Image: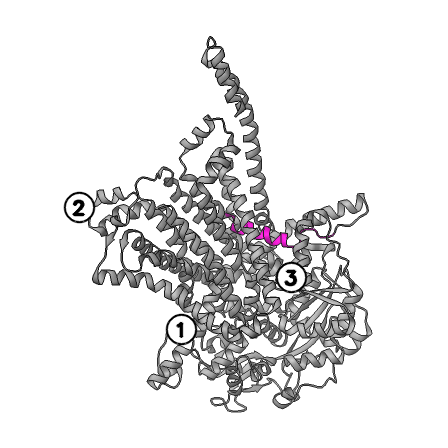
Amino acid sequence: MRAQTKAIWMALPLTGALAVSSVQAEEVNIYSYRQPFLIEPLLEAFTAETGIEANVVYGDGLVERMETEGRNSPADVLITPNTTILMSAYNKGLTQAVDSDVLTDNIPAQYRADDNHWFGLTTRARIIYASKERVEPGEITTYEQLADPEWEGRLCTRSGKHSYNLSLFASMIAHHGEDYTREWLEGVKDNLARRPQGNDRAQVKAIYEGVCDISLGNSYYFGAMLTNQEAPEQQDWAQSVNLIFPNQDDRGAHMFISGIALSEHAPNRDNAVALMEFMVSPEAQFLYAQDNFEFPVRPGIERSELINEYMGEFKEDPLSLTTITDHVDEASRLVDEVAYDF
Amino acid sequence: MKWLTTSNAVTGSQPSLTAAAVNAIPRNNAALGQNRLARRWRFAVVITAALVLLPVASVFYLALFPSHNIWAHLVDTVLFYYLDATVRLLAGVGLVALLIGVSTAWLVSTCDFPGRRFFEWSLLLPFAVPAYVIAFVYTDLLEYAGPVQATLRDWFGWRTMRDYWFPEIRSMGGAITMLALVLYPYVYMLARAAFIDQSHAIQAASRSLGCTPWQSFRRVSMPMARPAIAVGVSLVLMETLNDFGTVDYFAVRTLSIGIYDTWLSQSNLGGAAQIASLMLGFVVLLIALERFARRRQKHFSQVGRPGASGLYQLRGWRAALALSVCAFPLIAGFIIPALRLSYFALRGFGAYWTADFIQLSLNSLLLSASAAGVTVALGLLLAYGKRLFPSRGLNASVGLAKLGYAMPGTVLAIGVMIPLAAFDNGLDALLRNTLGISTGLILSGTIFALIFAYSVRFLAVAAGAVESSLAKVTPAMDRASRSLGHNSVQTLWRVHLPLIRPGLLTAALVVFVDCMKELPATLILRPFNFDTLATHVYQFASDEKLEASALGALLIVLVGLGPVILLSRSIRGSR
């Protein structure tokens, strides 16, 4: 890592002299929208196993960076926390299909592109967190109920514009249509205890503090809070809530993925495919599930004990991610129309 | 210089020639040289301005091609809310920063009270604290679970938050307070320099004409310092307009959040670029304001300095009041956050002081220092070109070159990327077609891209500082130097540079500190496996891991301290 950084600096005065043709042995270049602490343990395991060095840029705006860099872009793969960004790269023609049995055999069709331009790596459910003290079991069991007047002043969520919420709202449009969803969203907004703010964990904290009684959040944050050694107070937050996987009697809980795509101009194509295949290997899938409390996308991988204890088996909404992503724009417009964040 | 000695020799040896004829020879030569130099200056200024303008132009270009038209939708729905929040935030931060900055600057420049010399420099310290860091620190302190409310609950036996009222830190008021606390030093710095520059004689005259100290401040000092104060406030407002970290954290949904939402949640970069262009409108107004204010600064000359004896001596409750007015921003804007960060940093020192951490600290230092050097050099080029050849075209070029400061960092980063990648790919295609070799990306994704982005972003700061210190050098100096035979470059080197060195240093230091704190453009443009202190802090802080981010945040603050103290010296040095 340090040698690499040194090389970055040394290259500066030489940039004009075209002397940057690095003679790196084996490498793969990653543009990642996901945070370092989620990705790094996996990459270390990958390098240890294959000897291929992984170079990463973490940040937003990386799809645009790939686009402007064009055919000379150094990026081999794009890693994202949602399908919106994957689809945006796909629609700009920045991805290419991967013809790999390892990927298609192990990733259910619902969680990858029909033409193999992108693949899910982990799945997560968007669920309802409810106060143990103030919400009876069975009091709320569906997303639709979030708009019911009995929850007025009792709900907390993050910004409606966040991709996690947009994904859920888009699935509501896919199931119920735009008009129903607009009305539902207005109801949800009326129930908010405070203006949308903070991340998913901050909403659980708000339940702990008594600001509200229920919140929306991704399933894995529960594990992250419950086992948090650095910030032990988060364990108390987690202990104060029950997890409700919604709509178990009908379509199932809203699911979405974190995913990966191969860059159209990937200079290290073989290494990139090796990385993608590694990511669905039982080892990597187990690591993901173990460390990050997400669900392995590959069927049959053992889930962590914590997941089994608190989440068990639940019914997943089988709606295709492509369909959901197609409605994200509409969802985003509805969020503005009801002025959800204001 | 040579022609001058020859001409003297000529005049001496052949007195029969008319003086006019003698002078005509060298003058013609000089005029030729001057013309060539003038063309070169003009050329250099225009090229620099054009290069710096490229990213901004790229954003305008993007704004022409939105994936769908956002305005109809925005006007129908949330545009008003965005504007409302933006205007209230700007008004609040501007007002609070103005109050703190001017009152403290006036106190330390014209009054004597215990601690005055300490406050002179220490009031600049909050400038070293990034706004997003102070926001994290105060939220941790003041939120429900934080130590302050927990202690209050303990004392008074309250149980839940329904038992009592406590101001919500994550609010408009909180955002205004946080931003004003770290931005007021812009106003303080410029107001103080202006108060120091004011001749003491003028104040004394106003007093002898029957003004009370307060009237003298209101009717003489303030009007004279107004241009400088306006510059300070316009810098505060631009920083506020572009802030993303604090408003995002506090859920104050300003236009800069609107840009982010439009871009990332609707994949509509063109739409985001349109909002950014609208914000640029705001800023052009601010720049116009600044320019209007600075228009009158030209005739400032430095006559007479107030000695310590010329200061109002404050005693008793007046001294106590002055002391508290100065102590408040220092304690709230610097001491509390710094202590809190130190506490966390010490607790986590062993775990976080690693080889990687040292490396990324060095990255930040080197990067910021290089960018500061480049930016000030460019600023000097522009400001001096404008001084030499004050034409409308040049003035406009320099004005335009400052627009980068008005762009939100995220959008500007995309704007930087576009011309760099176009150059790289163009060269690559050319060489591939002619020589069959591929050069790949030479500038994109390198340190160069970051330095370029920082220069574009902060050129307004550097050029502004250089311009105002050049403005204090009377044009008589230029004429004297030129009549002694120096050309414009020699004059710059031998006359102006030594005179404006403190101003250049100030400019470099301000840019340096700004670069250390810069986050959004760094995140998007950086090379592989490359972190700076700012990206490091953000990575942890955005996940609410204050302890992990404290060491980095503290280091940004500490590194900023040196420049801030030097800065204060250089202002006092002019006394």
Which residue is found at the position 75% from the left and 50% from the top?
Answer: B439
Residue A62 has which mark? Answer: 3
Q: Hey, which residue is sitting farthest top in the picture? A: B16
Mark 2 lies on a secondary structure that is loop
Residue B168 has which mark? Answer: 1
Mark 1 lies on a secondary structure that is loop
Residue type (three-letter) at the residue carrying disc 1:
Glu
Mark 2 falls within which chain? B
In this picture, residue B356 sits left or right of residue A215: right
Q: Which residues are magenta?
A: B440-459
**Could you say which is closer to the camera, residue B204 or residue B136?**
B204
Residue B24, given in percent of the width and then of the height, sits at 50, 16
Q: Main secondary structure of the magenta part?
A: helix
In this picture, residue B155 sits left or right of residue B319: right
Residue type (three-letter) at the residue carrying disc 3:
Leu
* Residue B391 at least partly seen: no
**Residue where numbered disc 2 is placed:** B210
- Of pointers 2 and 1, the one earlier in the residue sequence: 1
**Could you say which is closer to the camera, residue A179 or residue B404?**
B404
